[in-house]
């Protein structure tokens, strides 16, 4: 009888340990999925000139850095309005989460115009972060890591 209880406690411990380890894996998968979906939606809205949706997503304290300088939320929307995006591909996503913030780095291959300068279609890295605000995510930061010629 004694070994039966010990066996039961051991099985319960193993089950709980595995369930905890599995929940961590599920959480990581969800963070990756959410971060990738946020990036994909952002680019889809930019391509479709969906300014209303972009303005809902961007936080009041948003900041971006581009090769020609920094921008606040209003300046970033104005820049996006002038992009005239061609076809693009997004790849090499890396997503992390710190507290209520999702940080995503990714590679983009696109031809775009920034501050009147045509940037030829080539691969570059980008970084964006979103803050969880109630039931939605707010875009709070963006870095465009492609040199101007």
Image (tube, rainbow, N blue to C red):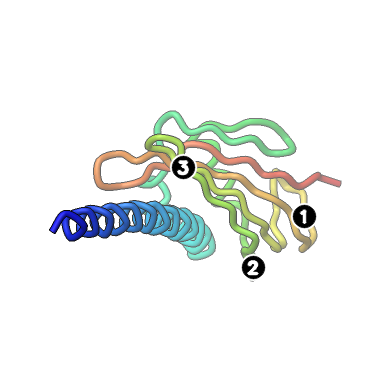
Left or right: 54 with respect to 15?
right
* Cβ–Cβ under 8 Å for marks 2 and 3: no
User: Circle 1 — which element?
Assistant: strand
Circle 1 or circle 2, nearest the eye: 2
Closest to the observer, 102 or 50: 102
Looking at the picture, how far across and down is residue 13, in whole percent? 28, 52
Crowding near pointer 2: few (<14 within 10 Å), some, many (20+)?
Answer: few
Disc count in the image? 3
Q: Quadrant of the N terminus?
A: bottom left
Q: Indicate which disc residue 97 carries.
A: 3
* Cβ–Cβ under 8 Å for marks 1 and 2: no
Quarter of the view holding residue 123: bottom right
Circle 3 or circle 1, nearest the eye: 3
Looking at the picture, how far across and down is residue 108, in whole percent? 67, 59
Closest to the observer, 138 or 86: 138
User: Circle 3 — which element?
Assistant: strand
Crowding near pointer 3: few (<14 within 10 Å), some, many (20+)?
Answer: some
- Residue drawn at x 39%, y 57% as measured from the top left: 30
Circle 2 or circle 3, nearest the eye: 3
Estimate the spatial distance between the alpha carbons at disc 2 and disc 3, rounded to whole Å: 24 Å
Looking at the picture, how far across and down is residue 95, in whole percent? 53, 50
User: Circle 2 — which element?
Assistant: strand
Estimate the spatial distance between the alpha carbons at disc 1 and disc 2, rounded to whole Å: 15 Å
- Residue occupying the far bottom of the picture: 87
Q: Indicate which disc residue 89 carries.
A: 2
The residue wearing badge 1 is 119
Left or right: 22 with respect to 149?
left
67 shown above or below 51? above
């Amino acid at each position: 009888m004694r070994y039966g209880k010990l066996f039961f406690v051991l099985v319960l411990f193993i089950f709980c340990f595995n369930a905890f380890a599995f929940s961590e894996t599920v959480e990581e998968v969800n963070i990756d999925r959410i971060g990738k979906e946020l990036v994909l939606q952002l680019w889809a809205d930019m391509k479709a000139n969906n300014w209303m949706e972009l303005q809902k997503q961007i936080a009041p304290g948003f900041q971006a850095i581009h090769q020609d300088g920094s921008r606040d939320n209003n300046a970033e929307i104005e820049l996006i309005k002038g992009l005239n995006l061609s076809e693009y591909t997004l790849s090499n996503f890396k997503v992390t989460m710190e507290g209520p913030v999702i940080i995503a780095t990714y590679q983009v291959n696109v031809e775009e115009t920034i501050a009147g300068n045509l940037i030829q279609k080539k691969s570059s890295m980008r970084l964006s972060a979103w803050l969880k605000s109630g039931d939605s995510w707010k875009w709070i930061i963006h870095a465009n890591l492609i040199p101007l010629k």
